[in-house]
Amino acid sequence: MKIVSGVLFFISLIFMHDATAQTLRCDTDSAKIGDSKSVIEMKCGAPVSRDNFCKRFDTGASEAESPKPQDGVTINVEQCEPVEEWTYNPGSGQFLTIPLFRGGVLESIKYGPRIP
C-alpha cells in the first residue's frame, strides 16, 4: 500500500509541476503571464540567455488567396511573428525556467531540465 501511495504522490507532483508553470518565481517576488519584459527583469534580474526567433503562424488564407506564380517563379510566403525566450537558472536541484515573450509581454513559461 505504501508503494502505491508513493507512486500516486509522485504522479501528482508531475501534474502540479505543469499547473504551476504560469508563474515565474524570483528571489522575493514572482512574475506572471501578461507582465512586460521590463517588469520581469526588475523582479527577477537578467536572464542567463536570451533567444530571439520568428515563430510561424497560420494565416488562415486558402490556396485560392495565395500568390500565384508569375513568369515561372513560385512565390512562397511564410508569415511569422517575432518572439523572445529568456532562460533563468534558479540553481542546483531546480529546473531551468524559460519564459516566452510575444509582443514584449510574457505569454507562457516552460521548464527545461533539472540543474545538477
Image (cartoon, helix red, strand yellow):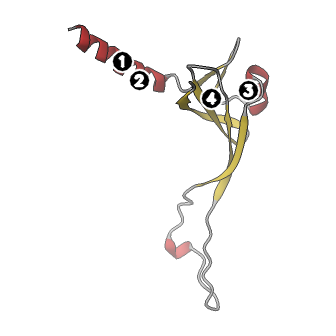
Give the labeled residue for mark 4.
33
93 vs 53: above or below: above
Q: Tell me, for residue 43, which label it has, or none.
A: none
Q: What secondary structure is marked by label 1?
A: helix
Q: Which residue is mark 3?
A: 40
Q: Is residue 35 above or below residue 71?
A: above
Look at the numbered disc 3 and give the secondary structure of its residue: helix
Q: x and y percent of residue 47 in the render? A: 73, 31
Question: Foreground mark, 4 or 2?
Answer: 2
Is tag 3's residue or tag 1's residue first in the polypeptide sequence? 1
Q: Badge 2: few (under 14), some or many (20 or more) residues near its Cα, within 10 Å?
A: few
Q: CA distance from mark 4 to mark 1?
A: 27 Å
Q: CA distance from mark 4 to mark 2?
A: 21 Å
Q: Nearer the viewer, mark 4 or mark 3?
A: 3
Which residue ends up furthest to the front in the rendered image? 116
What type is the residue that disc 3 sits on? Answer: Ile
Work out which quarter of the rendered image holds the N terminus and state it. Answer: top left
Residue 3 position by quadrant: top left
Report which residue position mark 2 lands on.
14
Q: CA distance from mark 2 to mark 3?
A: 26 Å
Determine which quarter of the picture holds residue 36. top right
Query: Quick check: 92 above or below 108?
Result: above
Circle 1 crowding by C-alpha within 10 Å: few under 14, some 14–19, many from 20: few
CA gap, disc 3 and disc 1: 31 Å
Q: Quadrant of residue 30?
A: top right
Image spot of residue 75 (x, y percent):
62, 78
Please name the residue that numbered disc 1 is placed on: 10
